[in-house]
Image: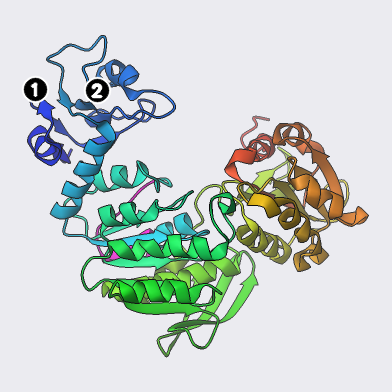
Amino acid sequence: MSILWTSEDAATATGGQVTTPWQASGISIDTRSLEAGDLFVALKDARDGHDFVAQALEKGAAAALVSRIPEGVAPDAPLLVVPDVLKALEAMAIYARARTKAQVVGVTGSVGKTSTKEMLRSVLTRQGKVFAAEKSFNNHWGVPLTLARMPCDADYAIIEIGMNHPGEIAPLARLARPHVAMITTVAAAHMEAFDGIEGIAREKSAIFEGLAPDGAAVVNGDLDSRQILIDAAKAAGANTTTFGQSETNTDQLQDVQLAQNTTVARVSLDGTPALFKISSLGRHFAMNALGVLGVVRALGADVGLAANDMALWQPPAGRGTREVIQLDAYDPDQSITLIDDAYNANPTSLDAALNVLAASAPTDGLGQLHTGRRIAILGDMLELGADEAELHAGFANHAALDRIELIHCCGPRMRALWDALPEHKKGEWAENAQDIASIAHSLLDAGDVILVKGSLGSRVSEVVTAIRKLDQTDVKI
């Protein structure tokens, strides 16, 4: 087991006091996922992590980072005592970033951050040792936690940086000090906290304030707000490239074909023609992949190998993953395809998800109806501000609905869409996701393709869970 932190290094980084020497192989903030040898960081959020220090040590934590000796913990227990735990974690992040040899990539954007981070992980894996957060740790504690977990010998590190309010991205970018920073897109998300799309663009462009000297910026050049991003990148002295469908972009998406759960993209990479395949449906995935190849080039890595390895990537859980749910224990053909996109939602990502559903192929001749359908189950899009009702209702006119048979809606905001739908497209509406989950079994039939999409706070993932419980693959017969 390799050593990530010694008590001496951690004390040097934080200025804290070590009660007894220790060595840690990892870092944890949650006793439920803590592994033996981890340093437990007692952050205070919804609950105070100090209340779990004794439990962490009992589970085999190497030590705990605390601001006081918790009740029930011996004074000579392995601790690092600091004035402020979060500030100490940030100090460890700075120390870890300074000691690593890795080229660091920072990724932000209204949509696609996690998918892009995982694409980069996939395509760089055969070109060096890659480090990236396992989850969407992209906020004020997630970024320093990710950096503090970064091993010294990584060749590449991919750091996801997010925000909910103005002023959040710049300090996180300064912690990460990326060599390359990518902005996937700017869209209507967290609108309650910003003065329109331009305000969101300015906040996203703050990632360039943290760029390392001679850093590079990779920007979506199709956006209406692109000049805000480009100007910010140039002000930071970045070598700037753009990606998108427009011919003015450095890297151009020229053609996309969606078929058989595969996306094939024909592109021009700084004037050089190329082709890549993604093993999942989605034009938006092709766009993110194009930006990823721009990042790979900025890193000085092998772009051709990365394009070839793009086929290895799959969407992260809850972000467009596809799975087959077998409804009959005796007959594997009696199945549905579930598209789980229940982790997040805003108008841009919902547009992309509906297009994916419309491009999906249901199967006829199965089930009770003998006609496969494309069905969407949609939960509320949150944090859209004063225009939320209009933004929801506007999807009643989405072009993809011509190929989607039914729309089921849950949540008070999605009521606006449900009311605006043509009668023959209206499925069920319920006040909350739990009510839709309770009748999920009655909303589908073998051969259907089912999209479940909504913001995390809408809890539409409960519908995904209910559908998965219908699977008969492992039923003993």
Q: Residues within 10 Å of mark 1 (few under 14, many from 20)?
A: few
User: Residue at point 33% right, 57% down?
Assistant: 158
Q: Which image quarter holds the N terminus?
A: top left
The residue labelled by disc 2 is 60
Q: Is residue 428 above or below residue 355?
A: above
Res. 220 in view: no
The three-letter code of the residue at mark 2 reads: Gly
Highlighted magenta segment, given as a residue range: 120-134
Q: Is residue 272 above or below residue 239?
A: below
Determine which of the numbered discs, if any, sits on residue 89 in the image: none
Whether residue 259 appears in magenta in the rendering, the answer is: no
Say whether disc 1 or disc 2 marks the residue closer to the N-terminus. 1
* Dot 1 and dot 2 residues touching (CB under 8 Å): no
Q: Residues within 10 Å of mark 2 (few under 14, many from 20)?
A: some
User: Residue at point 39% right, 26% down?
Assistant: 32
User: Residue at point 39% right, 76% down?
Assistant: 231
Residue 257 position, x and y percent, is: 62, 76
The residue labelled by disc 1 is 20
Q: Which image quarter holds the C terminus?
A: top right
Residue ranking furthest to the top: 72
